[in-house]
Image (cartoon, helix red, strand yellow):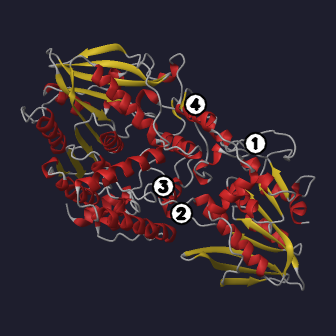
């Protein structure tokens, strides 16, 4: 395929992939470019450390460090060794193999649905655990691999990941589909919740895979000393993780994922269970998963036109090959590129068969793929309705996360909260930023300036200044931009106040506008490099305060601030650490972070998540940190945007409406109270 065609295809999938295919790895988005520079520096420091490892002893010491860091990032794995309570609910007798329909519990009342493919002839066989990619059907996706493995003398197990197949988390009986949209969106919902309590979502996916491996090895026809794992895309990620962390796996084939963050960070950023918190900041890259299990045999797979680019996978392969050379096992690491886009084409599937036969069957067997009957999803269902949530006692993932919070929660003091917010680098040094006027418009009683200022080196913030044409110091108001902000800002400015509206840093080009998620990609990327986007946005707000505080026409101690929706949480973070904000107005802002953990879904939670925050505090602790300064909080909402009646000190409209009603259309002028 010509390069032009590849660029057209990849641009449809990922705006940055076309740049990568053409050899240009610098993103156009300013914030993403700024974060990518940090990521590349962290990756370079890691590579410098890896380059110093010249012996097996040093490699083994690195393994201990890597495993410890991974467990820290995940929040550990569940501590449970109870029974699987496995049962077979049905079977399909196929030509040369049998498919059994299995259900078991990876945690108490947390059901996993699976299909087991076994040869029809009795005996003891090697086995392969197959992780499904991000198809809505889950376990049905790798059935062609599973059936062929069974025909080649393997036992194969495919299972539904959380959010897929029979384990959808947001199924709505009226929509007759997941309210979140599809599986990846459900993963994102749970990923934000996991971050709130200081855990990585991958811990639950890895645990399901480990318990699925437990079940596979419990089967009498399986030789527990000869077990492999394979999967593509999301399944390739989980294969990478289980291959690294479970020594029972003796041959590993991850496809369309195992890419170095050298290219992956600014490219097709993976979803919540694939992208680990503080991963790069902890000195890690994808090659660490491969190297952690060395010298276990790994075949790294890619496809020519994948957004997990072959070039990125090759970087992992080249580093891991040098690592394997230390163990005298270079033949146990290989790299295969199939044709076409993201997926497992026939030649890639055949490479899986060859790898498993080579390492689990001493090279004895025919690796050629055979035609098999592919069953529609409904024929492979394990449960009567196709949904585990209909089973008595079934728990959803959000309930497990909430249970973990209850077990680990340790409330801390306001002073500890303030110290923590300082550690997130929210406060500023108070110096005035250099302001550049991009445009201005003068009216009879008002000067309006379109301005830009630097929040920190490399980060420019735009805003609008509304300046009354009158002499002497005036009160000031800072407002976070929204669809109705301009009209309200002008109205307030005409009452004799200096008003600054601003939009904190963002990467709008990276917002894929999935329902309910907000700009998840930018938040995830910041988290991977050890930063926090809500905290950085709070810092941007305080740079706006620096700007106002330095103006000669602003009265000292007079700065008020206002925000709507989730942006109100950024403002709360800023006000909690800077007393120059005399009062704040929050409108339709979620009233509690804990409330976001009480259901399967939330709206824009990623835009507010600070990892581990809910272990110690809630939003009420931020208002408490403001002391006696005024907080006007109108129409507080839950995390689906629904106004919730909570009584005092919250205030409510008679009729729900937009921000202009709050400015005086009802019988109370909230804007005047904010600025008085």
Label total for image: 4
Identified at 10% across, 36% down, the residue is 367
C-alpha separation, residue under disc 1 versus residue under disc 2: 27 Å
Image position of 283 (left or right of 486)? left
Residue nearest the observer in this picture, 295 or 141: 295
Question: Is residue 655 among what the camera can see?
Answer: yes
List the residue tagged with mark 2.
508
**Label located before the other in sequence (4 or 1):** 4
C-alpha separation, residue under disc 1 versus residue under disc 3: 34 Å
Q: Position of residue 446 (x, y in %)?
A: 82, 80
Seen in the picture, residue 119 relative to 267 is either above or below; the reply is: above
Q: Secondary structure at mark 3?
A: loop
List the residue tagged with mark 3.
278
List the residue tagged with mark 4.
399
Q: Position of residue 201 (x, y in %)?
A: 48, 42
Q: Secondary structure at mark 2?
A: helix
Residue nearest the observer in this picture, 310 or 60: 60
Q: Position of residue 272 (x, y in %)?
A: 47, 46
Quadrant of the rendering where the C terminus is positioned:
bottom right
**Label located before the other in sequence (3 or 4):** 3
Q: Position of residue 651 (x, y in %)?
A: 86, 47
List the residue tagged with mark 1.
643
Seen in the picture, residue 604 relative to 141 is either above or below; the reply is: below
Residue that sits furthest to the front in the current view: 57
CB under 8 Å between discs 3 and 2: no
């Amino acid at each position: 395929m010509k390069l032009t065609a590849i660029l057209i295809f990849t641009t449809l999938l990922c705006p940055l992939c076309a740049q990568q295919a053409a050899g240009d790895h610098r993103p156009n988005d300013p914030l993403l470019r700024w974060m990518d520079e940090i990521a590349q520096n962290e990756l370079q420091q890691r590579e410098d450390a890896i380059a110093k490892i010249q012996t097996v002893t040093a490699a083994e010491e690195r393994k201990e460090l890597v495993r410890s860091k991974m467990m820290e990032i995940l929040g550990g794995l569940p501590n449970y060794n109870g029974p699987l309570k496995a049962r077979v609910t049905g079977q399909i007798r196929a030509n040369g193999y049998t498919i059994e329909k299995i259900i078991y519990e990876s945690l108490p009342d947390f059901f996993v649905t699976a299909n087991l493919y076994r040869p029809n002839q009795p005996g003891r066989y090697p086995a392969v655990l197959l992780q499904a990619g991000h198809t809505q059907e889950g376990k049905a996706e790798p059935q062609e691999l599973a059936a062929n493995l069974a025909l080649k003398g393997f036992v194969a197990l495919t299972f539904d990941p959380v959010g897929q197949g029979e384990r959808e988390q947001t199924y709505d009986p009226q929509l007759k589909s997941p309210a979140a949209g599809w599986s990846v969106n459900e993963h994102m919902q749970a990923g934000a919740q996991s971050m709130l309590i200081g855990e990585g979502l991958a811990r639950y996916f890895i645990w399901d895979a480990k318990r699925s491996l437990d079940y596979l090895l419990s089967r009498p026809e399986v030789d527990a000393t000869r077990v492999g794992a394979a999967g593509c895309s999301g399944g390739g990620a989980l294969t990478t993780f289980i291959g690294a962390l479970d020594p029972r796996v003796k041959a590993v084939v991850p496809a369309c994922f195992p890419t170095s963050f050298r290219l992956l960070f600014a490219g097709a950023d993976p979803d919540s269970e694939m992208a680990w918190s503080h991963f790069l900041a902890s000195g890690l890259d994808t090659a660490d998963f491969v190297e952690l299990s060395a010298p276990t045999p790994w075949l790294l797979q890619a496809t020519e036109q994948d957004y997990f680019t072959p070039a990125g996978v090759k970087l992992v392969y080249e580093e891991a090959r040098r690592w394997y050379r230390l163990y005298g096992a270079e033949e146990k690491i290989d790299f295969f590129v199939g044709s076409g886009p993201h997926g497992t084409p026939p030649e890639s599937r055949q490479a899986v068969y060859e790898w498993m036969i080579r390492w689990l069957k001493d090279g004895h067997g025919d690796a050629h793929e055979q035609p098999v009957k592919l069953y529609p999803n409904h024929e492979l269902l394990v449960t009567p309705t196709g949904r585990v949530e209909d089973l008595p006692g079934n728990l959803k993932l959000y309930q497990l996360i909430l249970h973990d919070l209850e077990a680990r929660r340790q409330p801390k003091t306001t002073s500890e909260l303030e110290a923590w917010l300082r550690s997130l680098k929210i406060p500023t040094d108070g110096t005035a930023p250099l302001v550049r006027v991009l445009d201005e418009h003068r009216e009879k009683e008002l000067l309006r300036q379109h301005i830009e200022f630097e929040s920190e080196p490399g980060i420019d913030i735009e805003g609008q200044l509304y300046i009354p044409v009158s002499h002497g110091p005036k009160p000031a108001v800072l407002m976070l931009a929204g669809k109705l902000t301009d009209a309200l800002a002008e109205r307030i400015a005409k009452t004799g106040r200096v008003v600054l509206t601003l939009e904190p840093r963002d990467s709008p080009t990276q917002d894929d506008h999935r329902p309910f998620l907000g700009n998840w990609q930018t938040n995830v990327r910041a988290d991977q490099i050890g930063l926090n986007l809500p905290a950085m946005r709070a810092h941007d707000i305080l740079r706006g305060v620096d700007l106002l505080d330095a103006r000669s026409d602003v009265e000292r101690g007079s700065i008020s601030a206002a925000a709507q929706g989730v942006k109100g949480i950024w403002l709360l973070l800023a006000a909690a650490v800077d007393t120059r904000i005399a009062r704040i107005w929050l409108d339709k802002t979620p009233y509690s972070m804990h409330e976001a953990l009480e259901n399967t879904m939330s709206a824009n939670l990623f835009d507010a998540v600070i990892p581990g925050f809910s272990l110690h505090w809630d939003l009420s602790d931020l208002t408490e940190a403001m002391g006696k300064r005024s907080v006007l909080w109108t129409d507080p909402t839950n995390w689906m945007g629904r106004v919730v009646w909570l009584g005092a000190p919250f205030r409510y409209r008679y009729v729900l409406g937009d921000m202009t009603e709050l400015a005086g259309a009802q019988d109370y002028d909230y804007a005047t109270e904010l600025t008085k």
